[in-house]
Image (cartoon, rainbow, N blue to C red):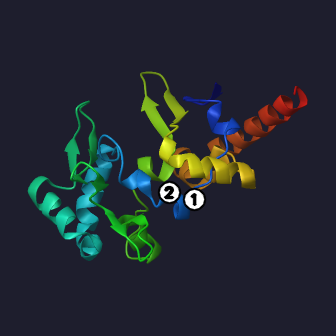
C-alpha cells in the first residue's frame, strides 16, 4: 500500500498496465455489471440538470427508464447508481456507427455543451474508491472485459495511474497526483532493480 494524505493506494495502481482499447472491448463497461455506475450524492442533481442537453442522444428505452424511475436509483447496498436499461446498459450510453458503446454525458462535454465530464466513478475506472472512517481506499478493479486494456497497456507501457492522470487530478488534486507519480516511479525503479 502507498499512503498519500488520507488515501491508501493499492500497489496494483502503480504496478499494473492499463490503456482502454475501445475497438476491442466495444465499451462493455457501460453495459455489463450488477448495477449502474456509482454516484456521489452531488452528481445525481447534476445529471438531472444536464438531462435536457443529452436527451436526444439517449435511446428510447433509456428515456422510458428515466421517465419511470429517474436518472439514478438506490442499489442493494444503499448506494446511488445510474439507472440502467434491461439490467445492462447505463441510461446515459449510446452506440456510435461502429457499435461502440459510449457516454452521452462525455460527448456533450467534448462538444462544449456542458461543463461536467461524467460521474467520477466512470472517469476513474478501473479504479474504485471505498470510503472508510479515516481514509479512502484507492483500488484497482480487475474485470475480465478489460483484458484488451491490460494487453494494450503492457504494449504501450502505460500504468493505471498514468492512464488515469486526469480523473485522479480531478478527484484528488495536482499535488496529490505529483506525489503519487514520485512514489510510483521510485517504487517501480526499486522493483526492477530487485528482479
Residue 79: horizontal and vertical position, in percent? 27, 36
Residue 70: horizontal and vertical position, in percent? 16, 55
Which residue is found at the position 30% from the left and 55% from the top?
90
Q: Nearer the viewer, residue 153 or 140?
A: 153
Q: Quadrant of residue 33?
A: top left
Disc 1 packing (10 Å; few <14; some 14–19; many ≥20)? some
**Can residue 69 be seen at all in this image of the molecule?**
yes
Q: Tag on residue 25?
A: 2
Q: Would you say 31 lies left or right of 187 here?
A: left
Residue 88: horizontal and vertical position, in percent? 28, 51
Disc 2 packing (10 Å; few <14; some 14–19; many ≥20)? some
In the displayed orientation, state which residue is furthest to the top: 133
Q: Would you say 2 lies left or right of 88 here?
A: right
Q: Quadrant of residue 71?
A: bottom left
On the rendered image, what quadrant is the N terminus found in?
A: top right
Residue 127: horizontal and vertical position, in percent? 52, 41
Which residue is found at the position 18% from the left and 70% from the top?
60
On the rendered image, what quadrant is the C terminus found in?
A: top right
SS category of the residue bearing label 2 = helix
SS category of the residue bearing label 1 = loop
- The residue that label 1 is drawn on is 21
Amino acid at each position: 500500500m502507498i499512503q498519500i494524505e488520507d488515501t491508501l493506494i493499492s500497489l496494483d495502481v502503480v504496478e499494473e498496465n492499463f490503456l482502454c482499447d475501445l475497438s476491442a472491448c466495444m465499451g462493455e463497461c457501460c453495459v455489463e455489471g450488477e448495477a449502474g455506475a456509482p454516484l456521489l450524492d452531488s452528481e445525481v442533481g447534476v445529471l438531472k440538470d444536464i438531462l435536457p442537453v443529452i436527451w436526444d442522444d439517449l435511446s428510447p428505452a433509456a428515456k422510458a427508464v428515466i421517465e419511470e424511475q429517474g436518472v439514478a436509483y438506490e442499489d442493494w447496498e444503499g448506494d446511488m447508481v445510474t439507472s440502467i436499461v434491461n439490467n445492462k446498459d447505463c441510461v446515459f450510453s449510446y452506440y456510435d456507427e461502429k457499435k461502440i458503446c459510449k457516454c452521452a454525458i462525455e460527448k456533450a462535454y467534448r462538444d462544449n455543451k456542458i461543463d461536467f465530464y461524467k460521474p467520477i466513478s466512470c472517469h476513474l475506472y478501473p479504479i474504485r474508491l471505498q470510503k472508510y472512517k479515516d481514509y479512502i481506499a484507492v483500488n484497482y478493479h480487475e474485470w475480465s472485459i478489460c483484458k484488451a486494456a491490460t494487453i494494450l497497456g503492457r504494449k504501450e507501457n502505460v500504468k493505471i495511474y498514468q492512464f488515469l492522470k486526469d480523473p485522479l487530478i480531478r478527484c484528488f488534486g495536482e499535488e496529490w497526483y505529483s506525489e503519487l507519480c514520485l512514489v510510483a516511479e521510485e517504487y517501480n525503479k526499486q522493483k526492477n532493480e530487485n528482479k
